Image (spheres, rainbow, N blue to C red):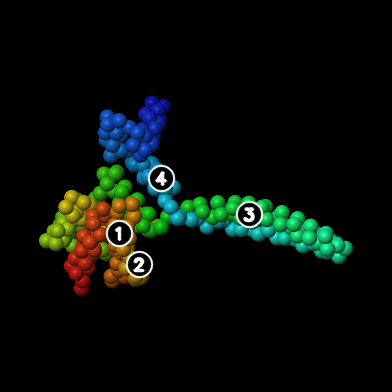
Amino acid sequence: MSGGEHDDHGEWNDLLHGFIDGELDAANAARFEAHLATCRECADEMENAVMVKRLSAREGVKWQAPEAVHVRVQAALSLEQAMMTRAAMATRQTETPWQRAWRLVREWSFVPSLAALAASLMLVLNVPQQSQMIEDQLLASHVRSMLADHLTDVLTSDQHTVKPWFNGKIDFSPPVVDLAAQGFPLVGGRVDYLDGRVVAALIYRRHGHVINLFIWPGVARAKTNAEKEGYNFVEWHADGLVFWAVSDVAAPDLATFRDDFTRATAP
């Protein structure tokens, strides 16, 4: 990369953060959106920045403290307890009643240090967990597919074209149906990467809204319905496959899509 290209890309990086924070004027925002559609590096950086901002704003998410932290905290508590025990044993043998009362007062003076240690531990334990939940990965892929202009790899509503297109690209055969008659027309398909493996993604529309349906092999478990940051999720299982639908359509519409897809692909 030449020096001029590097400088230009530095400018795009500056614009990216301004774009995420809503600080760009209309002209620069439009210019950045046009650049984002053609630059994979910026699209990836955009995805990472959006996810970091989303995770950092979340409440109630916790990280598990590293084992080394637990070891150091436990050692500190054990040492302080041992010091208290030795001091008590050395003085209790010769102390008078008044000295015994004074000892109780002094022993309480250890409480602030223990409280501070506990508070420090709570700060560590409340850091958000590093490994993303599957819903976070699904949401990131859904948003990225629209931001990076990579909604489809094969653009067609013909299910007989989409299904064979996956041959050789993934190690399973996803069911593909067009649900236009039910109000969910098929747009196309693509391959994506989720939870450490390549998956199939089918794209449908509902009154102008995009529905990403992610499919990969997996074991059956209880159905999941969830909502995250204005997006709805539904999960189901059939024939050894896991299905996750993600969209900003209303939850009842997404549930109807699941039911229509299940009926259309039933043996």
Whichever of labels 3 and 2 marks the residue nearer the N terminus, that label is 3
Which image quadrant: the N terminus?
Answer: top left
Alpha-carbon span between mark 4 and mark 1: 21 Å
> Would you say 107 lies left or right of 131 here?
right
Residue at the location (27% across, 59% down)? Answer: 245
| Mark 2 residue element | loop
Q: Residue under circle 2?
A: 218
Q: Pointers 2 and 1 in contact (CB under 8 A)?
A: no
Return the residue found at the far top: 4
Secondary structure of the residue carrying numbered label 3: helix
Cα distance in 3D space between marks 3 and 2: 46 Å
Dividing the picture into quadrants, the one containing residue 71 is: bottom right
Residue 53 disc label: 4
Q: CB under 8 Å between callouts 3 and 2?
A: no
Q: Which residue is mark 3?
A: 115
Question: Percent x, y for residue 28?
Answer: 30, 30
Q: CA distance from mark 4 to mark 3?
A: 32 Å
Task: Determine whether the residue tagged by mark 1 lies in a helix, strand or loop.
Answer: strand
Rounded to the nearest whole Å, what is the CA distance between mark 4 and mark 2? Answer: 30 Å
Q: Nearer the viewer, residue 249 or 39?
A: 249
Which mark is nearer the camera, 3 or 2?
3
* Relative depth, front residue between 2 and 145: 145
> Is 211 rendered above or below residue 45?
below
Q: Give the mark nearest the N terminus, 4 or 2.
A: 4
Is residue 172 visible in the rendered structure shown here? no
Neighbourhood count class around disc 4 (C-alpha, 10 Å): few under 14, some 14–19, many 20 upward: few
Of the two numbered discs 4 and 3 on the same chain, state the one appearing first in sequence: 4
